[in-house]
Image (cartoon, rainbow, N blue to C red):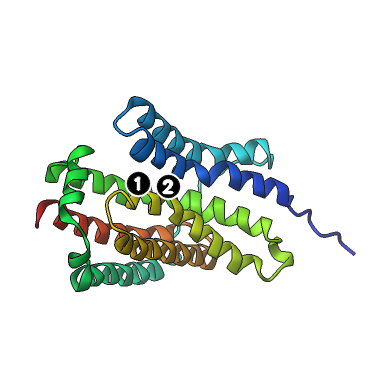
């Protein structure tokens, strides 16, 4: 009888999550609430972003003793990515037209855009492109690959049926957390609660795509459409278009 392959230690997975998950929330709190408009606050925010990108690679090298490999591009799942992305885009734009306009305080949002330097359409669109095409891919790498996999290990891996749905749910909550904190600066609690639910459901959807197609690119494609919808709404709020 062949022995089972050794399972990763749950304690290692818990430590990985503890080191990574709070970092972006801490960065948002420092940059937006505790130390706004200070060099220290901005530095901590930048440091948190670098940390969550570097930690997964360092973890593979130093803890799991494996060689990191760049994920190969794959077209598998692209149809599902486009379909779920278009559905998400439609839901976001539809929600904005139906009741978002009545709930969002436009003056607060425009004031915050001025404060962070996104005060012209060119600057706003440049920022939107960066978040939509670069940051979305990095988020898939961090939250769908690394965070999901560590929750899966912590919940028992292949030995327990609850591990997959539990990891999808918890990875979605972790992905939502720093977004919720950041959005509280721009929106009232009703809009923030609705938007946070959307972020959570997006995270769940992209984790399912990651599991189904064994790559981060199907979720990335879907994520792109979601970000496009958000920035279309943001542009209308900021510039009245």
Badge 2 density bin: few <14, some 14–19, many ≥20, Cα 10 Å: some
Q: Is residue 173 left or right of residue 30?
A: right
Given the current orientation, which residue lies at the most extreme right position? 1
Q: Is residue 164 left or right of residue 204?
A: right
The image shows residue 116 at horizontal and vertical percentages of: 23, 38
The image shows residue 190 at horizontal and vertical percentages of: 31, 64
Q: Callout 2: helix, strand or loop?
A: helix
Which residue is at a point 32% across and 58% down the rendered structure image? 224
Q: Callout 1: helix, strand or loop?
A: helix
> What is the quadrant of the C terminus in the image?
bottom left
> What is the quadrant of the N terminus in the image?
bottom right
Residue 165 sits in quarter:
bottom right
Tell me whether circle 2 and circle 1 mark residues in contact (CB < 8 Å).
Answer: yes
Q: Nearer the viewer, residue 70 or 51?
A: 51
Which residue is at a point 86% across and 61% down the rendered structure image? 2
Which residue is at a point 37% across and 31% down the rendered structure image? 41
Distance Cα–Cα, label 2 vs label 1: 6 Å
Above/below status of 16 relative to 150: above
Any part of residue 118 in sight: yes
The image shows residue 81 at horizontal and vertical percentages of: 39, 66
The image shows residue 92 at horizontal and vertical percentages of: 27, 67
Q: Which residue is mark 1?
A: 134
Q: Is residue 54 left or right of residue 240?
A: right
Numbered mark located on residue 39 in the image: none
Q: Which residue is mark 2?
A: 138
Q: Nearer the viewer, residue 81 or 39?
A: 39
Above/below status of 81 relative to 26: below
Any part of residue 73 in sight: no
Given the current orientation, which residue lies at the most extreme top position? 39
């Amino acid at each position: 009888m062949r022995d089972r392959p050794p399972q990763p230690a749950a304690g290692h997975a818990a430590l990985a999550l503890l080191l990574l998950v709070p970092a972006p929330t801490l960065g948002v709190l420092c940059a937006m609430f505790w130390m706004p408009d200070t060099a220290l606050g901005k530095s901590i925010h930048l440091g948190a972003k670098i940390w969550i990108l570097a930690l997964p690679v360092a973890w593979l090298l130093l803890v799991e003793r494996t060689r990191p490999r760049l994920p190969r591009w794959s077209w598998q799942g692209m149809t599902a990515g486009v379909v779920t992305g278009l559905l998400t885009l439609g839901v976001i734009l539809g929600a904005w037209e139906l009741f978002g306009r009545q709930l969002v305080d436009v003056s607060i949002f425009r004031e915050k855009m001025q404060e962070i330097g996104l005060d012209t359409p060119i600057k706003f669109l440049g920022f939107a492109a960066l978040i939509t095409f670069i940051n979305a891919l990095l988020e898939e790498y961090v939250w769908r690959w690394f965070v999901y996999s560590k929750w899966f290990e912590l919940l028992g891996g292949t030995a327990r049926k609850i591990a997959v749905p539990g990891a999808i749910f918890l990875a979605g909550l972790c992905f939502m957390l720093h977004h919720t904190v950041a959005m509280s600066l721009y929106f009232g609690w009703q809009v923030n609660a609705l938007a946070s639910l959307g972020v959570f459901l997006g995270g769940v959807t992209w984790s399912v795509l990651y599991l189904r197609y064994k790559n981060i690119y199907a979720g990335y494609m879907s994520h792109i459409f979601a970000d496009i919808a958000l920035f279309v709404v943001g542009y209308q709020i900021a510039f009245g278009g």
